[in-house]
Amino acid sequence: MNARERAALLQTLRARFDENMRRHQGVAWSDVASRLEVQVDALRALAAMERSGGEPDVIARDAASGVVTFVDCAAESPSGRRSLCYDSAALDARKEHKPAGSAVEMAASFGVALLTEAQYRELQRLGEFDAKTSSWIDTPAEIRARGGALFCDRRYGTVFVYHNGAQSYYAARGFRGLLRV
């Protein structure tokens, strides 16, 4: 990432931060910026989140450690991360009509994690997300071992958790990433 790209990304993140203070009450941009200045990998991850339509924003800062948490805050599941099956094992299991990739591997390539169910529910307290789309979430090993995977959405003012075969994929299902800096 060159200096101009870095400056543009930081400007975008700062503008979003300032426009959405309810997501991170009590967090100062100066604290966020100082952590980002020394973590080049975090900027690369945030750039990947941004390029794929995630609109990452700060949702928390740990008072003791100073760690800042970014999550994709786009209203719908990021458009550049849809039509993905859950993981590489699911992708390999598909014999035909394979999607372009998987959520777990794409998240890893960005340097982010899929949200857990608890994290997804916490995000929904900050706004209304996935009213028309859905997002894969981190699936417990015992469910994944049986061929399943979990996803969430928000309908009728309620957050729902569902299951599907991990090899399934839909044009309206993507994933949201989480990054701790």
Image (tube, rainbow, N blue to C red):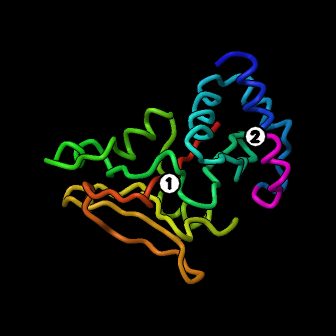
Q: Please determine whether, in this image, residue 83 is positioned above or below residue 181.
A: below
* SS class, disc 2: helix
Residue at left offset 46%, top offset 67%: 152
Q: What's the residue type where badge 1 is placed?
A: Leu
Q: Position of residue 135 (x, y in %)?
A: 46, 59
Q: Main secondary structure of the magenta part?
A: helix
User: What residue is rendered at 57% in x and 60% in y?
Assistant: 76
Give the left or right position of residue 36, taking residue 147 as reference.
right
**Which residue is at the far left?**
95
Q: Residue at x 54, y 73 (%)?
A: 154
Looking at the rendering, in which quadrant would you find the C terminus?
Answer: top right
**Rendering quarter of residue 10:** top right
Q: Say which element carries label 1.
A: loop
Q: Position of residue 57 (x, y in %)?
A: 70, 48
85 within the magenta span? no
Give how far across and how far down residue 48 sits, in percent. Answer: 56, 35
Dot 2 corresponds to which residue?
Answer: 13
Identify which residue, 168 or 45, lies in the foreground.
168
Mark-to-mark CA distance, 2 and 1:
20 Å
134 lies left or right of 73: left
Q: Residue furthest bottom?
A: 156
Q: Residues within 10 Å of mark 1 (few under 14, many from 20)?
A: many
**84 or 43: nearer the viewer:** 84
The quadrant in which the N terminus is found is top right
Please determine whether, in this image, residue 10 is positioned above or below residue 85. Answer: above
State which quadrant residue 50 falls in.
Answer: top right
Give, as a three-letter code, the residue at label 2.
Answer: Leu
> Range of the magenta residues?
14-23
Are there few (<14), some (14-19), or many (20+) residues within 10 Å of tag 2? many
Tell how many labels: 2
Between label 2 and label 1, give the one nearer the viewer.
2
The residue under label 1 is 115
